[in-house]
Amino acid sequence: MSDSDPASPLRVLVITEDDPLYVAEFFRVFLAELPGDEVAIVGMTVSAAFHEPLLKTARRILRFYGPRDFVRLGMRWAMRRLRRDTISRLAGRCGVPLLPTGSVNDAAYLERVRQLNPDLIVSVAAPEIFRAGLLGAAPQGCINIHSGRLPRYRGMMPTFWQLLHGETAVTVTIHRMVERLDAGSSLATVEVPVLAADSLDRVIRESKQAGARLMISVLRRLRHGAVEEQPLAMADAGYFKFPQPADVAAFRRRGHRMI
């Protein structure tokens, strides 16, 4: 939001990953329902998923889902690609300029960000760790949306770990970004109920949609300086890595499905 014109929209740069399956669910809601008179998306960077080559990502997903669900998910992914149903295309339809880069921490990219003059940078499943230069590139800093209750479910695949641990709801958290991962103050949360026998697919999709509406609410409140921040009690922090096949087997024994 411009210092010279407090009535102007909050200027936001979004950094995300190229995922047409789940992260795209966030943007379908977010871009459709965002109030343009209050929040202006001045740019979007869409990086490769996991910030790695596609083949490496495919191997990671195969190991996680197993052959049958990998094929089902792969067919869905291929159909979205054939229809060009991507985040980049969604952004283009809404007139949002794209800022491609090999790394969001590159000096050249940071210079482009400064020229855009965003008030705030928003991370939505951004696959790269934000370094100090990017964290300080906007007056209101950076915020992130995380599909887990913080600080308990810090790390990767928080939706999976919450279902595996028997949580009755998945908590989506929007928080400030600091140099320590998933450790900045909480700005808002929303819960998505979990069924006794549920699917990771359903819970992720509903969490993305609920998270999009939560993000809109937070951005509107940030524009007016009306967000109450809650520091995280890091003494209670956990951290989870990408699930292994044994974790997936335990997940299925709970009665949950992957897709």
Image (cartoon, rainbow, N blue to C red):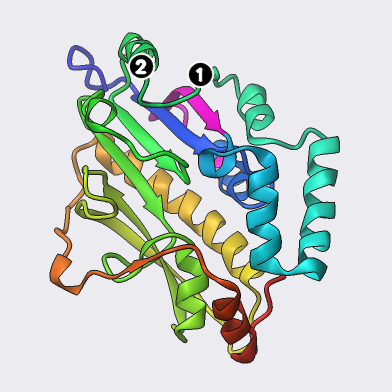
Query: Which residue does the image show at 47% across and 86% down from the upper left?
Result: 166
Q: Quadrant of the N terminus?
A: top left
- Label pair 1/2, CB-CB below 8 angstroms: yes
Which mark is on residue 99?
Answer: 1
Query: Which residue does the image show at 64% across and 22% down from the upper left?
Result: 92
User: Residue 152: x and y, percent?
Assistant: 29, 71
Q: Nearer the viewer, residue 47 or 204?
A: 47
- Residue 190 sits above or below residue 85 on the image: below
Magenta-colored span: 32-47
Is residue 41 on the magenta stretch?
yes
Q: Quadrant of the C terminus?
A: bottom right
Amino acid beneath label 2: Val
Q: Crowding at label 2, few (<14), some or many (≥20) Cα neighbours within 10 Å?
A: many
Amino acid beneath label 1: Leu
Is residue 179 on the magenta stretch?
no
- Judging by the rendered image, the residue that carries numbered circle 2 is 113
